[in-house]
Amino acid sequence: MDTTLTSPTQTARPVTPIGALARRTATLFVVHGILIVGAAFILLPFVWMLITSIKSPAEIFAVDFSLWPKHFNAVENYGFALQKVPLLRFAANGVIVCTGILLIQLLVAVPCAYALAKLRFPGRSALFALVLMGLCIPIQVPALPLYMGLAQVGLLNTYFAIMMPFFLSVFAIFLFRQFFKSYPDEIIHAARLDGMSEFEIVWLIVVPSAWPAIAAFSVFSIVAHWNDLYWPLIVISDTHLATPPLGMMFFADAETGSNYGALTAAATVLTAPLVIAFLIARRRFIEGITMTGIK
Amino acid sequence: MKGLSMLLSSFVLASTLATSSAEAQQVTLDVLYAFPAFAKFHEPIAQEFMKLHPDIKIAFRAPAPTYDDGHQTMMRQAVTNQLPDVYYSGFHLLSELTRTLAKRNQIIDLDPLLAADGKVFRAKNYSDRIVALGRVDGKLYGLPFNASSPIMYYNVELVKKAGGDPEKMPDNWDAVMALAAKIKAGSSDVAGLAYNVHDWPDVWLYHAMITQAGGTVVDGDRVPLGGPDIGVQTLQRFRRFVSEDGMPLIDWDQSRQQFIAGKIGIFFDTPARLRQVTDLIGDKFTLRTSIFPIDNKAKGGLPTGGNAAIITTQDPKKQKAAWEFLKFVTGPEAQKIVVETTGYLPTNLRATGPEFLGPFYDKNPNFRTVSLQIDRSVPWQGYPGGNSVRTWRAQREIITGIMRGEIEAKAGYDRLLKETADLMKSQ
Amino acid sequence: MMTSAVAIAVSAPVARRDRQRLIEKLAGCSFAFPAFLLLLLTNLVPLGVLIYLSFTNYELGALDTRFLGLDNFRKALTDPVLRRSLANTFVYVAIVLPGAVGLGLLIAVLLHRRKRMRTFYEVVYFLPVTSTLIAMATVWQFILHPNLGPVNGMLRAMGFCEIAFLSEPAYVLPTLAAIGIWQLVGFNMVLFLAGLSAIPRDLYEAAEIDGCRSGIDRFLTITWPLLGPTTMFVIITTSITAFKVFDTVAVMTRGGPMGSSEVLLYAIYLEGYQYFHMGYAAALTLIFLAFVLLFSILQTLVLERRVHY
C-alpha cells in the first residue's frame, strides 16, 4: 500500500484525503477482522460453558446441538452449586489468600527488583541467576519438604500455610527488573543529589512509573492463586479453609460422573470476581500512559 | 414427700452423671474419603449415624480428588503422624497402603472386631465374597464400603432396530458382538459397542474380560494374563470391537458422551455412573442395563472395584467408636443411600431386601442389575511386586496398539507377558 | 598550601563517590535480603532435599532407605520413557512459544491504539487466563469430540474427515499446544500492553514528523526496539511455562494415547506419585531443572545483548 521510507529526511509523498480515508478504513477492516476471528476462537469454550450451566442434564450431550436450551435449568444448576457447597465461603477464602499473597509479594519483590536493576552490590549476578532458576522450579519440587517443615512447626491447615510458598514471586522480581532497568538513571541521580534515600527513591519515584507492570502482575497473581488447587489440597484438611477450585471439585467427579450443569455454574460464579479484578486493574494500564513521557 | 425428694435428687444425680459421662465419652472421629462428589452419600449417612450415636461425632476432612490422591495423602500423613481415624481406600491400592501402615503400626486388624459381633451377624450382613475383598495377607484390614463390577448399558431403540430383543440381551460375548455388528450396520454414524479398556485408568476392564472366561490373571508370583488361549482370545476380541463393531477409539469420557447422545448401541461401564448417565440421557432414548456377559458360566468371575474402610487410630475408645461407624456405613440403611445416589453394588446382604432397596429397585430396575452379579465378585488383584500402576500403563499401550490394528494379537500377548515380567522383576 | 587545597578539592568528590558506592551496596543487599531469605527457604532448601533424595531409593511412607549413589542418574540416561517425554516436551514448546508470543504481541499491538471496543477485546482475550481447568477440561473434550463436537462438525461440513484430536497420537500434542496457546495469549497480551504503554507518546509524534508514516514502519523503528525488555521477558517466561506443562496433560489425556502426550513433568509425576519411586523422581526432576535452567540462561544471554534499555 504505502511505500516504506528509506530515510527520515526524505519528504513523504503527499497523501490525498480520500487516500487517507481509504487506508484507514482498510486498516480498520483488517484489524477488526483479525481481532474478531481471534475473539471467536477464544470465546468458543466459554460460550459452551455458559450454555451448559443453564441447560438441563438431558440436553447437554445431544447430537442436535442447539445453543438455546429447551428447558431452562439455570435456577436449579446455580442454586445447587451455591447451596450444596459453601461456594461463597470458598470465594471469601480466595479473597483472603490472594490479597495476603499479593501484598507480601509486592513488598518483597519491588525492592529486590530495583536492587537488581539499578544498584551494584556483591552477589548481584548470582542472585539474578537464582531468580531465573526459581522460575524454572515447578511447585511439585518444594511441596513435600515444605509440607514436612510446616508440619514440624505445627502450622499446617492455616491461611499462612496456603500463602507461604508464594510470598516470594520470582516472576514479579524478573518482571519489575525489566521495567526498572529502562527507568532513566539521570532522574535517580538527581533524586540522590536532592538527598532522597534509596528507599524513598524506590517507592516514591520509580514505582509510580511502573504501574502498568505492577497492575499486570497483580492481576496475574490474583488469578493464579485464586485458581490454585495443587498446594492448598496438600496443606488443608478442613473444608472451611478451602479455596475456590476445591469447591468446584465437588461437582467434578471422576468416579460417579460430574454434574456438568452445577460444575459450569460454579465455574461461572467463581470466574466472575477475576474478571472484575481485571477490569479494575486495567484502568492502570491506561493511566500508566499518562505517567510516562517524563522529560 | 421424702420419697419424692429422694426420687428427684436421684433423678438429678443420675442425669448429671449421664451428661458428664456422655461428655466424657464424646468421641470425634476424623474421616477421610476420596472423590468430593461422594459427599452426596457420606454426609447424609454421617447425619443418620450421629443421630443414633449422640456420643460420637463424625468430622470429615477435605476429601481427596481421587483414590490415588487419597493414597498419597495417607502416605504423607503417615510420615507426619496426622492420619485420619478412618479412611476409605480404593481396593486396588488397599494392599500397598495397609502393608505400609502395618509396618508402622498405624492400622488395626478388623477380624477380632467382626468376630466379637458373632457369626450370625456376619452371615446375615456380609457375604464371604464381599468380606474377602478387604483381606490383605490373610488379615481383614478393610471392610468393603463401595463395590462395583462392570455392567452392560444399552440403547433399547438401537437394539430393537437391529433385530435384538431388549428383554433378553445376550449373555455371552460372541452373541453380544454379533448384535453390535448388526447395530453398526443399521446406521452410518452409530457404533455397535464400546469397551473402553484402552483408556481405563486401571486394569479393571482388562481383567474382567479374562476372569469372565474363567482365566487366571495372577497366579501367586506369576502373571499368566489368562494363559495363551483366553489371553490371546481376549486381545483378539478387543481388536474385533474396533474392526467389526465400530467401536470408536476415543477418551472414555468422550465415549460415554457419545453413548449418552444415542450414538453407541451397547456400552460397558461401571455401575457407579448409572445415576449420572440416566440423568444425562433424559428422554433421548430408553436406557436399560444388563449383566456383564459371562462365557464361562461355571468359573467366570468379575473383578470388584470400589473401596474399603480402614481404621488407623490406636486409641481404644476411638477404635470402638470407629467400629460402630464402620458397621453402620456398611449396614443396610447406609448402603441404601449409597445405591440410590450412585448405582453401586450394595456391600450388605440385607440391603437388597424389601424393607430397604426393594421398592427402589422395582421402580428403577436398571439399578438392580449389578446386585445380580454379586456372586461373581472376585478380588481385584494387583500385580505382585508393587509396580501395578506402571505395569498397567505399559500394558495399556500395547493393548491400544492391538486395538488400532498396529500389533497382532498373538504377538501382542507375548509382548504383554514379557513387559509385565520385566516390570515385576525391576522392583 | 595550594597543593593541599587542590588535594582537598579533589578528594572531596572521590570521598562522596566512595560513600555513594557504600550506600548502594548496603541498599542493594538490604533490599534483596528478604527475597533472598525466602528464596533460601522455599526454593534452595527444598532443592537440597531433592538433591539428597536423588541419591537414594526413598519411597513415600517407607521406613528404610538405601543410598544409591549415582544409580538413579545412570538409569535416567538409558530410560526410553524419559527420552520420549523429553521429545514430547520439546515439540510442545516449539509450537507454543512462537504461537503464544507472536499472537500475544499481535493482539496487543492491534489493541494498543483502539478506543472503542478495546475493553471488550481485552476482557475477551484475558478470559482464558482466568479459567479453571477442572471445568474447562470437559468443555474442550466436548468441543473436540469427533462425533458430537462443533469443530469436527465444521470439518465435516467442509468435506473433511473427522479428527479425533485428543485420541490420535499424531494430533494430540498439537491439540494440547493449541489449548496452551489459548491459555497464554491473553497473559502475554497484558504484558505487551504494559510494555507498550511504557513507550512515551512523544517518540511517535517525533517519528511522524520525521516522515515515518505507515504502521509497520512505526512498529519497526520505535515500538519493537523499545519493547525489547518486555519481549525478552515474555519469551523467557513463555518458554519456561511451556516446559512446565502438566495440568492439561494430567486432566485431559493422562499421557495417552500410548504415551504420545507424556511430557517431562507428567512422567516425573508418575514416577514419584503413582509409582512412588521418589528417589528416581527426584533425579529426573534435577535433570529437568538443569535443562530448563540452561535453556533460560542461554536465552537471557542471547536476548540481553539485543535489548536496549
Image: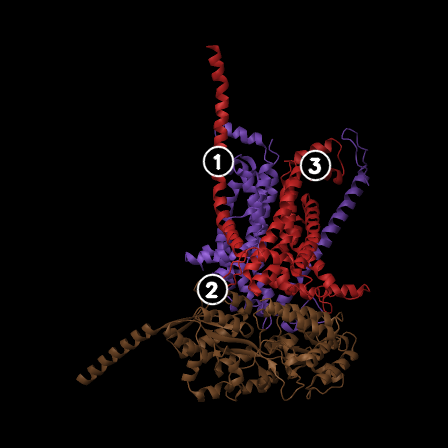
**A67 shown above or below B292:** above
Residue located at (52% from left, 42% from top)? A110
Q: Nearer the viewer, mark 3 or mark 1?
A: 1
Residue A60 appears in the figure: no
Q: Which chain is red?
A: C
Name chain B's colour: brown
Q: Secondary structure at mark 3?
A: helix
Residue linked to disc 1? C27
> Of residues B288 and C7, which is closer to you in this image?
C7
Q: Position of residue A160 (x, y in %)?
A: 45, 54
Tell me the chain of label 1: C
Picture coordinates of residue B116 (x, y %)?
Answer: 40, 84
Spatial separation of the CA atoms under disc 2 and disc 3: 63 Å
Tell me the colour scheme of the image.
Answer: by chain
Residue matched to label 3: C222
The tint chain A carries is purple
Q: Which residue is mark 2?
A: C63
Which residue type does callout 2 highlight? Leu
The answer to whether residue B370 is visible is: yes
| Alpha carbon distance from label 3 to label 1 | 34 Å
Q: Secondary structure at mark 2?
A: loop
Q: Nearer the viewer, mark 2 or mark 3?
A: 2
Q: Residue furthest top?
A: C1
Q: Nearer the viewer, residue B133 or B413?
A: B413
Q: Amino acid at mark 1?
A: Ala
Q: Quadrant of residue B374?
A: bottom right
Mark with earlier residue (3, 1): 1
> Which residue lies at the image location 64% right of the left edge and 39% below the top edge?
C304
- Quarter of the image holding residue B388? bottom right
